[in-house]
Amino acid sequence: MNFYNRYISYKTIFTLLSFFFVSLAFTDSGYITVDGETIEIDVDRSYQTPATYPRKALRLEREGYVIIEFDVAQDGSVIDPYVLEGEPAGLFNRAAMKSIRKWIYEPSTYDGVPVQVNDVQVRINFNLTAIQ
């Protein structure tokens, strides 16, 4: 395979991966504190942006995951996301963070009052076999 054909193949694969939806649940959970008591509460995702598979990971044919923790504001937006764990370290972090910052959740309430949900954790898996 000459260079041009290899370039076309990588370009085609990368384009397909740009539309790659990672494996995710649609309901996540976090915590609120009421009168000093910590209560687990579910948050429903209403919009998520698919993560783009990083070119370097594609070139190296690597798979992995990222676990991100964040809070969900009273309006349903994601605030203060950060990476708890990534495997392989650092390879997928940027793509996962870029995606998560655009997610939107249904606003959560407790006893009819809008609340911020803290310490929500999600795992984003990057899997090459999902696109084949």
Image (cartoon, rainbow, N blue to C red):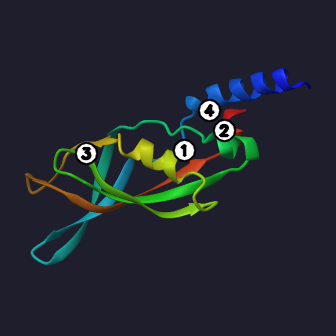
Which residue is pictured at 7% across the width and 53% down the height? 113
Q: The N terminus is located in which quarter?
A: top right
Which residue lies under the disc numbered 4?
A: 17
> Which mark is in front, 2 or 3?
3
Q: Are marks 2 and 3 in contact (CB under 8 Å)?
A: no
Q: Quadrant of residue 10?
A: top right
- Residue under numbered circle 1: 23
Q: Residue tagged by mark 3?
A: 77
Q: Are marks 2 and 1 in contact (CB under 8 Å)?
A: yes
Q: Position of residue 128 (x, y in %)?
A: 69, 41
Amino acid type for the residue under numbered disc 2: Ala
Q: From the viewer's perspective, tell me whether residue 63 is left or right of residue 7.
A: left
Task: Looking at the image, tell me whether mark 2 or mark 4 is earlier in sequence order.
Answer: 4
Tell me residue 5's x, y (percent): 83, 21
Q: Nearer the viewer, mark 2 or mark 4?
A: 4
Which structural element holds mark 1? Answer: loop
Write the residue at 61% across / 61% down.
Answer: 87
Mark 4 is surrounded, within 10 Å at the Cα level, by few (under 14), some (14 to 19) or many (20 or more) other residues, namely: many
Q: Mark 2 Cα within 10 Å, few/some/many (few <14, many 20+)?
A: few
Give the mark count: 4
Left or right: 5, with 86 as reference point: right
- Three-letter amino acid code at the position of disc 1: Ser
Q: Report the disc number at residue 130.
A: 2
Mark 3 to mark 1: distance in Å? Answer: 21 Å
Measuring 63% from the left and 27% from the top, which residue is drawn there?
A: 16
The mark closer to the camera, 3 or 1, is 3
Q: Residue at x 73, y 32 (%)?
A: 132
Front in this rendered view, residue 34 or 59: 59
Find residue 83 and report its image quarter. bottom left
Asked whether the beta carbons under mark 1 and mark 4 sit within 8 Å of each other, the answer is no
Asked whether the viewer can see residue 47, the reply is yes
